[in-house]
Image (cartoon, grey):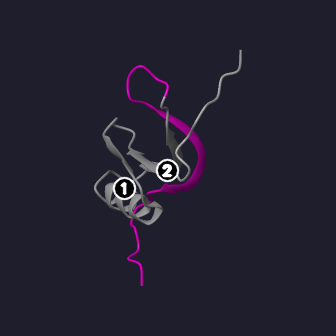
Amino acid sequence: MVVVVHFDTEGFSSWTASDDDGRGSCGITGELERASARLRQALQELAPGASGEVQFVRLDRYASDPSYIYGTTLLRLHRGKAIAAAE
């Protein structure tokens, strides 16, 4: 028996941010730049020490409930005392 697994060819970007108090947010988008911007915004709204990452994900088409297969971490950020504005 041969099982063929098909994945989305491009995939998505997942972002998650959380702080030491357990607060945080997350999301999935089709654009890496948007995921990076949302992660940065989320970290600005959390307490110093918060951290987050952007990961590559693909839709698992064979799961009984919609789910993702998480892959490579593309970006990690940590919030210090202040986040400098991008120029």
**Residue occupying image coordinates x 31% and y 51%:** 46
Q: Nearer the viewer, residue 34 or 11?
A: 11
Query: Looking at the picture, how far across and down is residue 84, in whole percent?
Result: 41, 74
Q: Position of residue 12 (x, y in %)?
A: 47, 50
Coordinates of residue 48 in the picture (x, y in percent): 38, 54
Residue 39 lies left or right of residue 73; in this view the side is: left
* Residue 27 drawn at (x, y percent): 35, 46
User: What type is the residue that disc 2 sits on?
Assistant: Glu
Above or below 63: residue 27? below
Name which residue type carries label 1. Leu
Q: Which numbered tag is attached to residue 5?
A: none
Q: Which of the pair 32/10 is nearer the observer?
A: 10
Q: Residue furthest top?
A: 1
Q: Which residues are magenta?
A: 62-87
Which element is circle 2 on?
A: strand
> Would you say 53 lies left or right of 48 here?
right
Please, which residue is most extreme toward the right here? 1
The crowding category of the residue bearing disc 1, from other C-alpha atoms within 10 Å (few below 14, some 14 to 19, many at least 20), is many
Question: Which of the image's four quarters has the C terminus?
Answer: bottom left
Q: Is residue 28 left or right of residue 8?
A: left
Q: Quadrant of the N terminus?
A: top right
Q: Nearer the N terminus, badge 1 or badge 2?
A: 1
Quarter residue 31 falls in: bottom left
Residue 43 circle label: 1
Mark 1 residue element: helix
Residue under the point 38% across and 23% down: 65
Tell me what residue is drawn at x 51 percent, y 49 percent: 11
Nearer to the camera, 14 or 80 = 14
Question: Is residue 79 covered in magenta?
Answer: yes
Q: Is residue 22 above or below residue 14?
A: above
Mark 2 sits on what residue?
A: 53
Compared to 63, does 71 lie above or below? below
